Image (cartoon, rainbow, N blue to C red):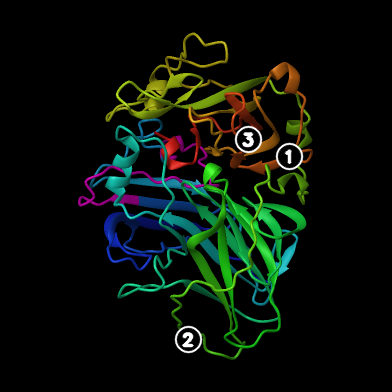
Amino acid sequence: MHSVLTKKRTSEFNVRKTELNPDCFNQSYTSLTINDQFPETILRVVTNDIVEVVVKNSNKNNASTSVHFHRIYQLKTNYADGVADGTVQDPFIVYETEDALKNAEKRKQTHKMIQEGPYKYHDERILHWSEWWHQSFHDRLNFFLQPGFSGDKDPVGILLNKRSVHDDKSPSDNCPYFTVIDVKPNSIYRPRFIGALSYRVLGITISDHNMILNELNSEHFKSHLIDHLELVPSQRYSVLIRNGNYMKSTMFPISTHLKWRGIDGAGYSPNGYGYIRYMNDDSYASSITVAQKPVSLPNIMIPNVNGWILSQLKLAIPGPASILSASPSRTVKLAMQQIVLSNNITRFTSNGRLTKPWGTDAMSLLDKVREDSAYGNLSSNGFSVKHQTYPINLGETVDIVFQNMRRSNGLCVAHPWHTHEFSHYLLAEGEGNYEHGQYRNVTTYHKPLRKDVSMQYPAPANGTIPCSWTKVRVHMDNPGIWAVHCHIAGHMV
């Protein structure tokens, strides 16, 4: 066994506009890329690395931007968290650069078998899932902000490793085709699923291959067999699959179902597919193009189940009793509701408050708080109107309840909640309104999972306006101003 030496690793991200057509349509659309690469470069790091990322925003973009890293936490570098609405930094305007120092995740390698946590496997593959709309990034932003917006539309494409085929009967010239992932027979592989999604929840299957869930956001579990993987926006999982003794060039489809679509129902996505292809040890993996969607897929409907299978998972290393068995110092309830303003523009409120501009082009909220740290009078639930934050003391253990509010059309929709720079422990969920006196000691996850994204599941239609809730616990050991938000793009306006 050998390990990669810990060191400082420097990368440069050049954010540029690029014309892309990843789904073989008859037209390209303007998107942002890093270093003109699509898919993007993978940064490989090991425990305790110092990672320096220099971000440069091209003068051709005509837009400010920011970069936020998931699960690689900002320690004493709050200004580099990547929330560019004036919260902790000003956005990178054109020509502007910024260095961000970060601590990184863990990866160990060997020549034959890889071991990470309690699991051994021969090799791994990345399955990066994202959505695609036939809109430029400018048009997509305007779509959210324009009067009359009432909700997002289904993506026209689900991309696996940035590839799909919009119409497999007439793919365009220079089509990248569906992604084909090569594997070897009689071996154990670790597919890493990355949910670079901003709207839909996917149910993912690999035909004729059982998946054993073993990791979520770097937390290892005792082996748990699953019939599909539920992937929500911004979530990351890995599974283990044992490849069979199949002949060279044997292929199996990777399929996606659309879950939690409300009144639209569920089913296979129109083009969210890929393939695994078996190659022998001594064979050369020649390139292959596949434009056709899988045929004769099983006629199955993956059910929507609140919590999926998360309550059944058992952590390899349980969470700390000092946090999970302690009584929280307080409980903060956040009720997010979609409203329509008098000018017919849709916005979301938190506890009845519209989001206010936090900073200015010259001074972020972080700068303002550093200049004047007195947060003034607090509301009954601990909100500082002056700073537009919930002040929490260093070392506090706090429960946060995400209260789901039904829309005016009667729907109670799903929300994947993300906590910046903190992992939280998923404690409980339920339907209706969270009443603290009634539910303060309720735990539906008896072995709480440590995550940075937790799905707030919907409830049946035509019920109470407060329709479902999710409770998480955070231990405040990383001083700073950190965002907490739903990871659906249209819910961040």
The kind of secondary structure element at disc 1 is loop
Give the mark nearest the N terminus, 1 or 3: 1
- Residue 258, x across and y down, in percent: 55, 53
Can you see residue 114?
no
**Residue sticking out furthest to the bottom:** 282
Q: Position of residue 16 (x, y in %)?
A: 28, 55
What's the residue type where badge 1 is placed? Answer: Pro
Depth check, front residue: 3 or 323 = 323
Task: Label 2, secondary structure: give it.
Answer: loop
Please report the bounds of the magenta region as a residue range.
Answer: 55-81
x, y (%) of residue 294?
A: 53, 72
Q: Earlier in the sequence, mark 2 or mark 3?
A: 2
Q: Is residue 317 above or below residue 192?
A: above
Give the percent coordinates (x, y) of residue 361. 27, 30
Tell me whether the residue at label 1 lies in contact with that at label 3, contact meaning CB atoms closer than 8 angstroms: no
The circle on residue 460 is 3
Q: Which mark is residue 96?
A: none
Horizontal arrangement in the rendering, residue 407 relative to residue 85 (left or right) = right
Q: Which residue is mark 2?
A: 286
Up/down of 469 relative to 307, above or below: above
Residue at x-position 40% and y-position 30%: 87
Q: In the drawing, does residue 82 fall left or right of residue 32? A: right
